[in-house]
Amino acid sequence: MRCYLATILILGSFCARGTVEAQIHVVATIPSLGALATEVGGEHVEVRSLAAPNQDPHFVDGRPSMALLLNRADLLIHVGLGRESGWLPPLLTNARNGRLQPGRSGNLDTSSICGALLGVRGRDRRFGDIHPAGNPHFLYDPRYGVRVAQAIADRLAAIDPAHARDYRAGYEGFARRMRARIAEWESLMAPFRGQAVVGYHESLVYLARWLGLRETGFIQPLPGIPPNPRHLARLILEMRSEGARVVLVEPWYEAETSRVVAERTGATVVRLPGDVGAPHVRSYPELIDRVVQSIHRALSGAGRR
Amino acid sequence: MSWSYTVPFVGLLIQLGVGAASAQEPSPPDAAPQEAQDAPGPEDAEALPALEAEIEEELGSSPEEPAPASGAAGVTPTDLGRVMLLPDVSAALTASIGYYSDVPTPRLRGHEPDHDRRGLSLQLQELELAIQGVADPYVRADVFVGFAPDSAELEQAFVTTLSLPASLQLRAGLLPAEVDRFNTRHYLMLEPFADMPLVHRRFFGGHQLVGIGMEVSWLTPLPWFVEITFEVITADNPVSFGLPASETVGAKDVLTVGRLEQFFELTDTWSLMVGASAAQGPNNSGGRRATASNRTQLAGGDVMLKWRDLATVRQLRCILEYIVRRATVPGGRTIEGGAYLQVDYRLGSHLEVAARADYFGLPSLLRGELAFGDVTGAELLPFLTPSRQWRVGGSVSFYASEYHLWRLQYNLDRLLGDDAGLVGRRDPVHEVFLLYQVILGTHGAHPF
């Protein structure tokens, strides 16, 4: 009897949770999006991210516990463009949450509000594991981050009209701070415009375009296809020819290949921090700052050599 | 790649240059097609082979990347499909070459490797056509059709609700029975073996346990993942049940299944999934008129311990499943059980190794004397007669990409027979399979 009572109390407490807590429950697929929601929503939102900061967002293990988070969420924020297509759809089905289904107010596909995005090279998987509708790595360009923050504020205001003014103010404060930081970062990197760099995956195209860097090649021969010796040999020759002295690698890619390439070209391997939540990266502006400062340090060092 | 109409449609508009840009500051630049990253231009004909050999020595060899044809971003077939409201369509082809040192142990026709004699066998195990998509704001639909060289079969076809209240979900159609974890999975694509666990083969034949009916599941409001599922489906499976949908007339003719599944996040990398299932339904061992008294009950439990490295695709899984079947049949009652232990490890993007040990006959009991008569086909008798069998095997899989793999598997399979001598004892059979699989199109994401 005592056991039954305890069970009823536990179930009752969770059923009643929605009425006791005033916060909007936000689930973001990647920490950057979660950080933007926190910037905008402040105390009115409780934000959970599904992917870990050091996890490749293409290959997240869609745990059933994530379906539970989605089941109780008011808003799902995701990148879109197929970046989460390998793991999010079954979670969304299993979540049984009508508010979060595509097209509903609780489902925010951030790629849909980013305007023009960079495309891809090919039309089928001869070109690798492509995203046919566009490259989804736009959050490395902070200007897109600002735009996404505005969309989050708008969506939160629609879901929670009582705090619409706070969300708008949260966005405006964030945009103001970012505007100043973007100018600083652009100024810092201005001397390196046109510098050649190499990425591991085609995830830095937006960053390179923003900072005026020239991506001469990638460690992966095609998106999602692991490198082979012939491709690496070609890449090394091209790096030598183009004077590329920096290899940019996100933490979820293996380090050994980048080391081999760097050793043969005299390049510096820059291990990027991953996402918000990585050591010393507590917010979206800090993430962009860490990325920019890391590249700046590496290019400055390369220049002195 | 995506799962809604909204996402790709908007993506397509963007790609076509009609995406509406917001007006706030600062603003990203307008669309600019990414410059082609084609093969390097200035190749040193002498330096390249030497450098390639040097790298191969240090890092090992990998497959050649396909040579991309020149092309520019544009409207893709998938995008076009979205605009036309077409569902995701994919085809998965699985073919294998098998070698058997003796006639393989009992199995029924299905998608497993099979042969009727010793020696080599070339087999197109399955071409699975999957059609999946969201039908409307309320349901999604999934259809799977399996093709073999001489047959086609509707394997599964069901709709799933997306937004019922109280965390309930309904599925209806031709459904897999939730008798354990394995039965709900398309094993040729999701498990690192060319064949089924022994206990599934012996209880359900060449196919998994499916039936036409309805399922309701409830995601409980507890702090951890607890899902309770109840199913009522037709008892078509010829091995354990055998009452086709066309002859189902009442409640006693259907298969009822219940399952409780729990998931525990032990750490960021370790997790544990625990399930328990039970099912009961009529069996046809005494003919249609005797199904009220001839019943089959199934019960089972399964545990999966999983480690997943967050930063890479490396993962380790340990899976243990056990199912026991009790069947009332003409002349008596049988009680049989089987279990398997599987350990698989994904080393990286390319390689996966796996091992599996099966034992069938835990227990292997016969009460009374079996008298099936003419009702039961001769090919089913070995599957209804209690006996013991064990098998151990291992596999190595090479993934050229996530859509294309080679797998080499070895089994040592031994039928131990039964105490009454109804099923003969056999010498061990060595089995080797070389499996090839390729996936075309927009294939749905895999479950956990």
Image (cartoon, coloured by chain):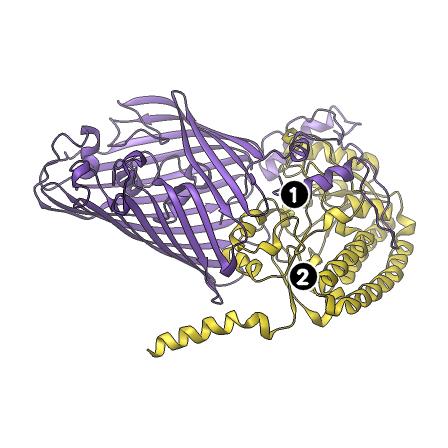
Chain colours: A yellow, B purple
- Answer with the quarter of the image where residue B274 lies: bottom left
**Considering only vertical position in the picture, is A57 above or below B267?**
above
- What residue is rendered at 51% in x and 70% in y? A14
Q: Is residue B61 visible?
A: no
Q: Secondary structure at mark 1?
A: loop
* Tag 2 near tag 1, CB within 8 Å: no
Element assignment for label 2: loop
Residue A31, numbered circle: none
Whether B108 is drawn above or below B215: the answer is above
- In front of the other: A60 or A91: A91
Q: Nearer the viewer, residue A229 or B95?
A: B95
Residue type, numbered disc 2: Ala
- Quick one: B314 or B263, which is closer to the camera? B263
Q: Position of residue B26 (x, y in %)?
A: 88, 54
Give the residue drawn at x 22%, y 46%.
Answer: B296
- Comparing B53 with B314, the one in front is B314
The residue under label 1 is which amino acid type? Gly
Q: Chain of mark 1?
A: A
Outermost residue to the front: B249
